[in-house]
Amino acid sequence: MEPVALKLNENQRGAFLIIEGDRQLGEMVIGISGKKLKVYHTEVAPEAEGKGLAKQMLDSMVSYAREQQLQVVPLCAFVLAQFNRHPDQYADLWKKDGQG
């Protein structure tokens, strides 16, 4: 398993990344505003698909959101699908439409 790194710029925009050597294998693009963490897109390099990298990034993002007490807005299809499949697992941080 490759480690997941979080890189944020001064505007709180960035990504959770999985990098192996000099190649980026996975990216989960996020933005943080106030107490909301928006997930825009998740992508895994074709040669790394099927190895659970998207799930690793999801787990890292969820851990970070809980540590920072952020509500997650899943705009990314992958993250939204995972939240819908396992609502109890993410109920504490899932920011659904219409919730404040």
Image (cartoon, rainbow, N blue to C red):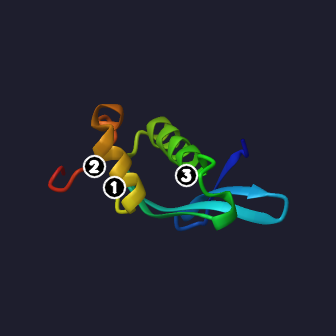
Q: Position of residue 89 (x, y in %)?
A: 35, 32
Foreground tag (1 vs 3):
3
Query: Is mark 2 in CB contact (under 8 Å) with mark 1?
Result: yes
Q: Is residue 83 visible?
A: yes
Quickly name the residue at label 3: 54
Image position of 75 (left or right of 30): left
**Element under disc 3:** helix
Q: Nearer the viewer, residue 94 or 25?
A: 25
Report how far apart the C-alphas of labels 1 and 3 lie in the structure: 17 Å
Residue at image position (41%, 39%) is 69
Report how far apart the C-alphas of labels 2 and 1 lie in the structure: 5 Å
- Quarter of image, res 19: bottom right
Quickly name the residue at label 1: 73
**Element under disc 2:** loop
Quickly name the residue at label 2: 95
* Circle 3 residues within 10 Å: few <14, some 14–19, many ≥20: many
Foreground tag (2 vs 3):
3
* Circle 2 residues within 10 Å: few <14, some 14–19, many ≥20: some
* Circle 1 residues within 10 Å: few <14, some 14–19, many ≥20: many
Q: Position of residue 77 (x, y in %)?
A: 37, 61
**Image height of 52 relative to 48, above or below:** above
- Going from N to C along the chain, the mark reached first, 2 or 3, is 3
Which amino acid lies under the numbered mark 1 shown in the image of this protein? Val
